[in-house]
Image (tube, rainbow, N blue to C red):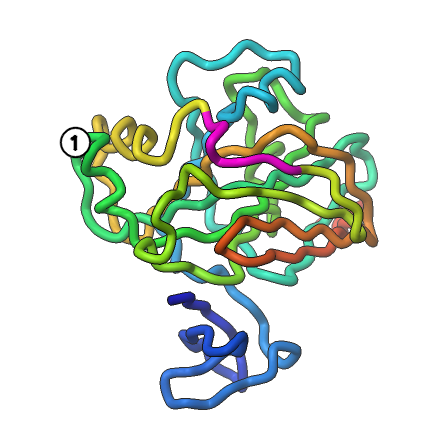
Amino acid sequence: MRHARIAWAGAIHDAIEVNGQLRLADGRVPAEGEVVWLPPVKAQTVFAVGLNYADHVRELSFKPPTEPLVFLKGPNTLAGHRAQTPRPASVKFMHYECELAVVIGRTASRVSRDAALDYVAGYTIGNDYAIRDYLENYYRPNLRVKNRDSATLLGPWLTDAADVPDPMNLALRTMVNGKLTQQGTTADMIFGVAQLIEYLSSFMTLGAGDVILTGTPEGVVNVNPGDVVVTQIESLGSLTSLIVADPRDGVRE
């Protein structure tokens, strides 16, 4: 089953997908164009994994990591399907990152790799924008790279883990203005989903609603205001975002 969270008719609703439509718990079926899509999970701690695809590591001319490179993201970064993401006018290279997002379903502490997938509630699509101009070094993305307002999209749906039998065999792709610019497969992750859960839970307790963004394959290209970016993952759907000029450019308070 696929789940969504939307703002509609002055309230926030949980919804499910039925025959390609949104259906609320009371049976109402709002039109997609009338709703504001929210991230499909009320995210708690958001973990982002850097350099987790070998082809992307080569694309950036870095050495492959020997253990997961993980950093945290603040709640201000999160937005939903069809959201607008601002691009500062002064930057030279801002790009999308199509990522499999893993949503934890229950408390996980010192979980073994063999049991790790039992702790997953479901999966959704992440598009985690980055500004390369601000990158300090390969192992420590600074705040300006990865914690920008509305720069991490999740959605549209949270797909139950039971409906994704093998998260390590999903095709990913990104299109910018209808042109295919990125494609890959989760099979090429350096650290797989189960390994990431084992690693993180070995030194901290994971909880329901925690999200792990698992990295992106090669094929990231620069995007500009007006660009429509669609990230897709097999079995999970399509996540759309619009790049806009940053309304804060030149504004000082």
- Which region is colored magenta? 183-189
Question: Can you tell which quarter of the image residue 240 is in?
Answer: bottom right
Closer to us: 184 or 176: 184
Q: Residue at x 46, y 14 (%)?
A: 65
Against 230, residue 198 (above or below) is above
Closer to us: 154 or 56: 56
Q: On the rendered structure, is 219 left or right of 45?
A: right
Q: Residue at x 64, y 37 (%)?
A: 183
Give the residue type at disc 1.
Arg
| Residue 250 in view, yes or no | no
Q: Residue furthest top?
A: 63
Q: On the rendered structure, is 21 left or right of 123?
A: right
Residue 82 on the magenta segment: no
Q: Residue at x 45, y 68 (%)?
A: 4
Q: Position of residue 7 (x, y in %)?
A: 52, 75
Against 123, residue 68 (above or below) is above
Against 40, residue 119 (above or below) is above
| Residue 17 in view, yes or no | yes
Against 184, residue 178 (above or below) is below
Q: On the rendered structure, is 26 left or right of 108?
A: right
Q: Quadrant of the N terminus?
A: bottom left
Write down the residue under mark 1.
110
Q: Position of residue 251 (x, y in %)?
A: 78, 49
Q: Residue at x 72, y 26 (%)?
A: 133
Q: Residues within 10 Å of mark 1 (few under 14, many from 20)?
A: some
Q: On the rendered structure, is 202 left or right of 239?
A: left
Closer to us: 172 or 225: 172
Mark 1 element type: loop
